Image: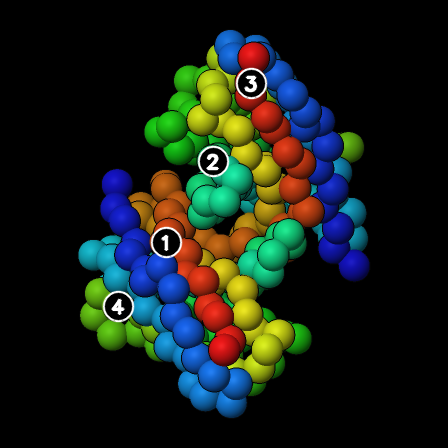
Amino acid sequence: SFELTQPPSVSVSPGQTARITCSGDALPKQYAYWYQQKSGQAPVLVIYKDSERPSGIPERFSGSSSGTTVTLTISGVQAEDEADYYCQSADSSGTYVVFGGGTNLTVL
Amino acid sequence: QVQLVESGGGLVKPGGSLRLSCAASGFTFSDYYMSWIRQAPGKGLEWVSYISSSGSTIYYAGSVKGRFTISRDNAKNSLYLQMNSLRAEDTAVYYCARRPTVALLYYFDYWGQGTLVTVSS
């Protein structure tokens, strides 16, 4: 098994850039995916294949990868972006799916 | 539009059983892998199980292996999770989610709203 590690919380002011990291040994071998979960709602996919954005997701959401760390970047953060964000990947064989512990983004 | 609607949650005693269902619509159900993912109150997401489009390939998280059984009925566009020997730590909202059937991609593009399972005496 493997783990994905995220910071528990990140805080930014409106209009600033938020960066949320996710680290894991398997990340060079497997893509990472990111989900946004607002309070009381189901998760929503915001990034897939490290950096691809699904249709309907604002351009201010972007993803990047470097070695064992992937990063979700939200440029020009808005109040509506306040949520929990989870990274997710799979083991090298695709047998097991793993989620990071989640990062609570607070917009000050 | 894609819809996933879970049902079957509720209060059950430790050691008891429960069967969750997920009704799918708006897409060709038999073309997609499906998964169950859970979230304990105030906690993060935990993958539980997934099943291939035909049902021939199934995987479970270690925490539920041997106690939970995932299945599907493509004729009824439905996904199921039979949960036996339930424990307090199984208390969570259970989400059904769709996984695109693309080789080497393991993500979930649509999620249901979830059904709450509470295991308590």
Q: According to the image, label 2 marks what residue? A: B48
**Classed neighbour count for the residue bearing mark 2: other residues with Cα under 10 Å, few (<14), some (14–19), many (≥20):** many
| Element carrying mark 3 | loop
Question: Do we see residue B44 in this rendering?
Answer: yes
Q: Nearer the viewer, mark 4 or mark 3?
A: 3
Which residue in the structure is indicated by mark 1?
A: A100
Tell me the distance, in whole angstroms, between the alpha carbons under discs 3 and 1: 27 Å
For the N terminus of chain A, the image quarter is top left
Q: Are marks 3 and 1 in contact (CB under 8 Å)?
A: no
Between label 1 and label 4, give the one nearer the viewer: 1
At x 53%, y 29%, the residue is B91
> Crowding near pointer 3: few (<14 within 10 Å), some, many (20+)?
some
Q: Chain of mark 2?
A: B
The residue that label 4 is drawn on is A69
> Residue at (75%, 38%) from the top-left corner?
B23
Q: Is residue B102 above or below residue B55?
A: below
Q: CA distance from mark 2 to mark 3?
A: 20 Å
Q: CA distance from mark 4 to mark 3?
A: 39 Å
